[in-house]
Image (spheres, rainbow, N blue to C red):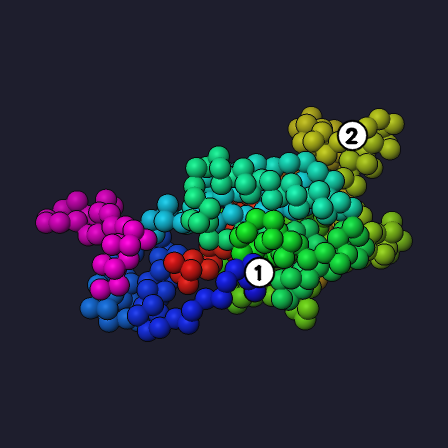
Amino acid sequence: MSSTGGTAEAPINLWNLGRVRVLRALTERPRLSRADLVQRTGLARATVGSVVYDLIAANLIRETADTTANGARTGRPPQLLSLNPDAAYALGLDIGHDHVRAMLTDLTGESRWDHSEPLDVDDDPERALGTAAGLVDRAIAEAGVARTDVLGLGLGIACPVGENDDELYADGIMPGWIGHRPADELAELTGLPVRMINDANAGVLAERRFGAARDCANVVYLRLSSGIGAGVVCDGRMLLGHGGLAGELGHVPVEPHGAICRCGNRGCLETVASPAVIADLLSRGRGRDVGVADLPGLLAEGDRGALRAIEDAGEAVGRALVLAVMLLNPELVVVGGDLVTAGEALFEPIRRVVGRNTMGSQNRDLQIVASTLGDSAGVRGAAALVLDTVPEKL
């Protein structure tokens, strides 16, 4: 994935390569001993000791006692190393169809500032990007960090993104954005290097790093929000496909005679299972407005119409996931987005349809679970794009 708006970086020499390996190990595992670092980096013990001394002196990592060590041990407790959370920061942006959200995180991914602005994004890119830049400025100012300590800006957007991170496939999805290059425009507005990713791909990054999919090498993340999309990791690597367009499960036809989708196809999953469509369906059935925010309350009350609408949506999601399970054989499916608040009313039909329509060898160990990050997965995944570059940048 490319960077935009930054200066060219100098080649990494052998000494810096040792620093990068140590920092990479501490990015992947927060607390390691020197012996752990020798094992994980392949560096000599003396080299690790020298690099660690240098990084501590530079205030990039810190050393703390292992308080979980066996209390029967005598002498000095083992010392564990971790990144200094305040050595630098990352910014994430989530531009959805109906909001712009920004989050500032420290090096460990902990949020230091988080704010969302409701906004109709699809037809007004200038306003959306201006709002995003304003949130970036607010985050830096209100969190009290120096702009020079911000390593970069990750942008997750509810639109297919080309394989080089700088092109949107906005036709039929976000029509007002055709011809725009948001990463370049945000780099100019903020003065920060920008990396861009599809919002569902950002979600799978976040779930693997912070959430339900930690340590999972084969996972599908499905985001059920105003737009529906999937992020896929196979054998530990993001699956992007030719042109970067893999995972568009929201535009898989599930109702052959269904409604026309904004992408031009008929009966796409988005036309059946997005929260706004479900709310609109209930509104027409009742003759009064039902909003997305009303759905959890109706479900909690046991409203039969809402339960039926969610069950139908879950079955449609299951039909789309059958294709993903048959083709990709994941060990885990994580479902995120607004609709997850429906709980088992949504998940029972999903699991039932997937179990009925896939081979036993594929679904025997398959888990289908709710996101543990909720609606923050997209913005945290966008920040994780920057955090992934921490070893090289530091």
Residue at 87 percent of width and 33 percent of height: 284
Quadrant into which the N terminus falls: bottom right
Q: At label 1, which amino acid type do we have?
A: Thr
Q: Name the residue under label 2.
A: 290
Residue shown at 89%/53% (left/top)?
257
User: Is residue 78 found inside the magenta-colored segment of the image?
Assistant: yes
What's the residue type where badge 2 is placed? Val
Give whichever of 255, 391 is nearer the camera: 391
Question: Which residue is rendered at x = 83% and y = 31% of the image?
Answer: 283
Give the residue at the far right of this rendering: 257
- Residue 132 lies in quadrant: top right
Q: Which of marks 1 and 2 is nearer the N terminus?
A: 1
Q: How crowded is mark 2: few (under 14 residues within 10 Å), some or many (20 or more)?
A: some
Residue with the mark numbered 1: 4
- Name the element at disc 2: loop
Which contiguous range is marked in magenta? 50-79
**Mark 1 Cα shell of 10 Å, populated few (<14), some (14-19), many (≥20):** many
- Judged left or right of residue 77, residue 39 is right
The residue sitting at the bottom extreme is: 14
Q: Residues under labels 1 and 2: Cα distance?
A: 42 Å
